[in-house]
Image (cartoon, rainbow, N blue to C red):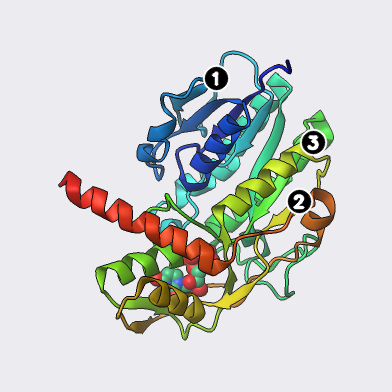
Amino acid sequence: MARQKRALVTGGVGFIGSHLCERLLNEGYRVVCMDNLRTGDLRNVAHLRDCAGFEYVEHDVTTYIDVPGGLDEIYHFASPASPADFERIPIPILKVGALGTYNTLGLAKAKGARFMLASTSEVYGDPLVHPQPEGYWGNVNPIGVRGVYDEAKRYAEAITMAYHRHHGVDTRIARIFNTYGPRMRPDDGRMIPNFISQALAGEPLTVYGDGSQTRSVQYVDDLVEGVFRLMRSEERRPVNVGNPVEYTVSEVAGVILDLSGSASELIYEPLPEDDPKQRCPDITRARESLGWEPRISAREGLKLTLEWFTRRTEEVAAER
Ligand code: UDP
């Protein structure tokens, strides 16, 4: 029988991290799930706590990381990622992108582990090229409010490549585009959790700007499949992992109103600083290198997400 692999997932209690831990356990891995609980929610892994092979460690990866025993793979997914967090906790975001990536790369080097950085479409900033291929260098305002996240992730990519070139660490870089699904925090501040929470509460949906800016939204299961394939591939260049079907923000609001049957109206609020006008991945590389493309449509994924938010709202009400 093949030896059981052991993986570390930083940010393992977060929205994406918890789905990744679950997938790795299902694939037969032993999983060390690490989180400092700044934005993660332990309820996201409550169903995994009793699984053989699942280990939870509360630790802040911006400080030295000690994981006893061997590690085959490290998935560095720790980071707040909501634009609402960029103003609320800018320095922890810079630290986890810089120091957290430095520490996890050091751990990968010490353990001889394969390393994956969760990077982001934000490395493209407010893009002047559309859709965005990996070869595009981006249009980022380093001193704007979004700069703390964008530049931390750009630094994280740079140090990942330096550890690859200089130390021979076997690295992967996933550039993750807007992802949604069960386990997003209802108060996370991003478009989909806001619209769903507002629709369920019968409150107006807050559209920023005139709602004509675009995003391409990917369901979390598609993302996890892409990430899983990338770790197994020999592709060391950054790979966009996103759904290339593009919607305006107003269209996303419309689909959520339709699926929820909510009578909420749309209200228009000021557009946040440096809010990208358009975003859509060119996924040619993921198709060619990973044989991957998203399978779940926005309507299907949003329906599953609405169902989960409805259940979570009921659970929270019952706990009170
Ligand atoms: N947005 C919105 N209403 C909200 C939250 C977000 O109109 O309540 C807009 C936001 O201005 C952006 C898009 O939705 O244009 C996606 O925002 P999100 O916070 O999900 O992440 P981003 O893609 O900007 O990182």
Residue 113: % across, % down: 71, 26
Whichever of labels 1 and 2 marks the residue nearer the N terminus, that label is 1
Residue behind mark 3 = 164
> In the rendered structure, which disc, 1 or 3, sits on the residue that comes first in sequence?
1
Q: Secondary structure at mark 1?
A: loop
Q: Quadrant of residue 294?
A: bottom right
Q: Is residue 84 above or below residue 28?
A: below
Figure quadrant of the N terminus: top right
User: Along the horizontal axis of the image, is 318 left or right of 265?
Assistant: left
Task: Determine whether, in the image, residue 313 is placed left or right of residue 284.
Answer: left
- In this orientation, does residue 144 appear? no
Q: Are marks 1 and 3 in contact (CB under 8 Å)?
A: no
Tell whether 132 sits left or right of 275: right
The label shown at residue 66 is: 1
- What is the spatial separation of the Cα atoms under label 1 and label 3, in whole angstroms? 21 Å
Residue farthest to the left, as pictured:
320
Residue type pointed to by label 2? Pro
